[in-house]
Amino acid sequence: MTETPITRAARGTPPTVARKIKGLSDRAIAWIFVGPTIFLLLAVNIFPLIWTINLSFTNFRANRPNREVEYVGLRNYERILTDTDIWLNMQATAHFLFWTIVLQVLIGFTLAYLINKKFKGNDLWTTIIVLPMMLSPAVVGNFWKFLYQPQIGLFNYIVAFFTGKDPSSFEMLGQVNLAPWSIVIVDTWMWTPFVMLICLAGLRSIPDYIYEAAEIDRASKWRQFWTITVPMVMPFLMLAVLFRGIENFKMFDLVVQLTGGGPGSTTELTSINLKREAFEKWRTGYASAYAIILFVTVFGLASIYVKALNKVKER
Amino acid sequence: MSSFSVTEPSTRSKWFAGSLVILYALITMVPLAWIMLTGFKSPADAISYPPKVIFDPTLEGYVNLFTTRTRQTDEFLAANPPETWYEEIVRQYDMVIAGPSKFGERFLNSVIIGFGSTFLSVFLGTLAAYAFSRFKIPLADDLLFFILSTRMMPPIAVAIPIFLMYRQLGLSDTHLGMILLYTAVNISLAVWLLKSFIDGIPTEYEEAALIDGYTRFQAFYKVVLPQAATGIASTAIFCLIFAWNEYAFAVLLTSGTAQTAPPFIPTIIGVGGLDWPAVAAGATIFLLPVMIFTVALRKHLLRGITFGAVRK
């Protein structure tokens, strides 16, 4: 054990006196402090999770609580994994995930790179850029719906202004080919600042002397960018992608308010689909199995990703 | 430039970078500015084509947001001249104010549930974070990861059993139920974030206090808490903003008494689906506090959104 004032004082104090001075032992305090948090999480997260697992093997319907519940084994899981509609929802989610991450990384990194040029007033503008990500996604979705209105919406007007098209000739939320992009646009508007902030922290963590050394070695700016800047920012960028990935996999509020999953089911992300099954069709057992599959997917993907992230960090 | 440095960007590149960033900032502000403007338009101006930037500002949207109105006969209107400025606004449409709308209540619910859950999660989070930061806890890393992993569940997935559980316990659509739920969701953020702040406080102060005869508990609240004040305050704001913005649980588990503003605002639009100014007014009132908090929080923003993983 290392010599600290405490250990020295402890050695010099008789045990009975020591107990009086310290009051409760550290171990007791540790458990008193951590206990309530763990208890709350067990009650509101783990207990429900176990309940969901249990429900997932049944044909329980929450709107008919008095009906007898039968155990159906793995049938719910089988039906979900062979259901082609659910694969369509998965594809919609994948499209949303892929494009939001690509766009947010590109725009976010570029912005961070530019802000890191330390021009005058960059703090002020950074704060302004950050605003959208702190807002309520449901309310944001709701007012973007207004902007997306054909004919009267500002978005259509601006697009029409620059392209010369008729503003009522396209419906961002109503057309099968545009709706998946409408949700990508809003999510990118909202969350690019998140990636930007994390990249900015990465850029600021690079010490000046590395660039100075590279300059002495006569490395070109281009080479410096690819051999210093990018690798050093990479762990930060990957962390940002992890956060955005998990969040967008769970995406519900923003998209529900914007498109409600439509038109048809083109923007029906898995969370929205799950909500339909659980709270509109009331197929509770089936929806529970669905929830477990989603949770295992996020958890699995996130764990693999974190391993990769740690490898990048070690380099 | 007085001293030459290879890492200092040239004036020209600063100027270039600055203008691009400012351009982005202005574009990104357009939707927000538009919604705030729309709150001061009349319903007709709000849906005019081309979109109007210059218009006669009116408080109609705000009046509609806070009131319910009924149509009245001409005789009634003639017999009862409007007494207040908001009555006058409503009279343009031959209507009278019938009473307050539910927006006030929903907003108050947001405040009660937001502050209640924030207080609880910061209180519990501070204790847990202190313990994780200072004591040897068996399997501490696993426990911390467990705490974080509760955030990975899609809210809808958790909502199914919570819905059943709350129905059984009579917690559906109650303030207490929502406060407990939001506390459970926020506690992972509170623990991780506060741990990162408390880790940054040197242990020497507490050790000195312990030698001076403080108990561990006294040392915690007389020495550590004051030093962690900034961290606690910014954690509280993050928890508050999250609870304030939450929609999925609110829409599934509340319908009346405890319904918060986010599920309510989209319903303001009304039967005809045309009262955009009232929706915009509601959104403005609801979003403004968050914007102010964000500006106040800007120094700790990064740490907050990454659960304390990235510190500046």
Image (cartoon, coloured by chain):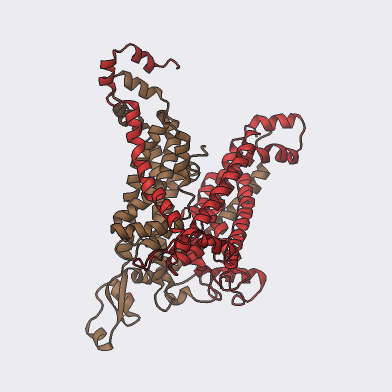
Chain colours: A red, B brown
Residue A304 is left or right of residue B82, and the answer is right
The quadrant in which residue B209 appears is: top left
Q: Residue furthest left?
A: B79
Q: State the image coordinates of residue A274 (x, y, percent, origin top left).
A: 49, 63
Q: Within the image, what quadrant is residue B234 found in?
A: top left
Instruction: Give B161 or B102, whichever is nearer the viewer.
Output: B161
Tell me which corner region of the image, top left, top right, bottom left or bottom right, holds residue B275.
bottom left
In front here: B309 or A151?
Answer: B309
Residue nearest the viewer, comparing A120 with B272: B272
**How many numbered discs sit on the rendered protein?**
0
Q: Position of residue A281 (x, y in %)?
A: 45, 70
Outermost residue toward the top?
A12
Is residue B19 shown to the viewer in this render?
no
Q: Work out whether residue A57 can be spotted.
A: yes
Q: Residue B255, image x and y in percent?
A: 34, 65
Query: Quick check: A199 above or below A26?
Result: below
What residue is rendered at 66% in x and 29% in y? A209
Vertical placement of B293 versus A273: above or below? above
Quadrant location of the N terminus of chain A in the rendered image: top left
Which quarter shows the C terminus of chain A? top right
Q: Give the x, y percent position of residue A172.
A: 58, 70
Residue under the point 41% across and 33% down: B132
